[in-house]
Image (cartoon, grey):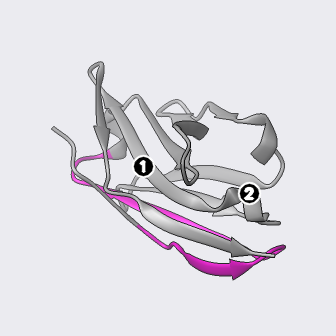
């Protein structure tokens, strides 16, 4: 099993930055893929960024060049650096870990971007 706890959300003006963190209950090196999902108000949860334990990354088109996903093995933490934030980035951001083909989720952290 993997427990995930997100933090770092908040209120920011458009054009600003935030860094989200997700602390895992086990070594992130043991987790094949970790990612961040965004759920906008009234919409489905969607993947925005993912990283494998081999260091491979992928991004949803709308955040490519603005968001950066990374992981710190020493701290068992996944990060999402979000720059040039837009009002459409508003929503709850969930951390995900795919561990032996099972998906684990955190409770989410709310990001609000004002125009």
Left or right: where 102 falls relative to 84 = left
Q: The N terminus is located in which quarter?
A: top left
Q: Residue furthest top?
A: 101
The answer to whether 89 is drawn above or below residue 45 in the figure is below
Q: Nearer the viewer, mark 2 or mark 1?
A: 2
Please state the horizontal and vertical placement of residue 34, each as a whole percent of the image: 45, 38
Numbered disc 2: secondary structure: helix
Left or right: where 69 falls relative to 23 = right
Please state the horizontal and vertical placement of residue 79, each as a whole percent of the image: 53, 58
Between 24 and 62, the one lying in front of the other is 62
Q: Is residue 37 magenta?
A: no
User: Which label sits on residue 95?
Assistant: 1
The answer to whether 75 is drawn above or below residue 62 in the figure is below
Q: The C terminus is located in which quarter?
A: bottom right
Please state the horizontal and vertical placement of residue 104, each as a whole percent of the image: 28, 38
Range of residues picked out in magenta: 7-27
The answer to whether 68 is drawn above or below residue 111 in the figure is above
Please state the horizontal and vertical placement of residue 48, each as a whole percent of the image: 63, 41
Left or right: where 36 falls relative to 104 = right
Q: 10 Å neighbourhood of mark 2: few (<14), some, or many (≥20)?
A: some
User: Which label sits on residue 4?
Assistant: none
Q: 10 Å neighbourhood of mark 1: few (<14), some, or many (≥20)?
A: many
Q: Earlier in the sequence, mark 2 or mark 1?
A: 2
Name the image quarter holding residue 30.
Answer: top left
Distance from Cα at disc 2 to Cα at disc 1:
19 Å
Q: Residue at x 69, y 62 (%)?
A: 82
The answer to whether 14 is drawn above or below residue 60 in the figure is below
User: Which label sits on residue 88?
Assistant: 2
Left or right: where 28 falls relative to 56 = left
Name the image quarter holding residue 102.
Answer: top left
Numbered disc 1: secondary structure: strand
């Amino acid at each position: 099993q993997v427990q995930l706890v997100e933090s770092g959300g908040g209120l920011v003006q458009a054009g600003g930055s935030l860094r989200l963190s997700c602390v895992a209950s086990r070594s992130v090196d043991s987790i094949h893929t970790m990612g961040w999902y965004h759920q906008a108000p009234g919409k489905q949860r969607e993947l925005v960024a993912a990283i494998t334990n081999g260091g491979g990354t992928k991004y949803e088109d709308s955040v490519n060049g603005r968001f950066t996903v990374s992981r710190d093995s020493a701290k068992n933490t996944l990060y999402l650096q979000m720059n040039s934030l837009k009002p459409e980035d508003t929503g709850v951001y969930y951390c995900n870990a795919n561990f032996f083909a099972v998906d684990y989720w955190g409770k989410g952290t709310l990001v609000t971007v004002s125009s």
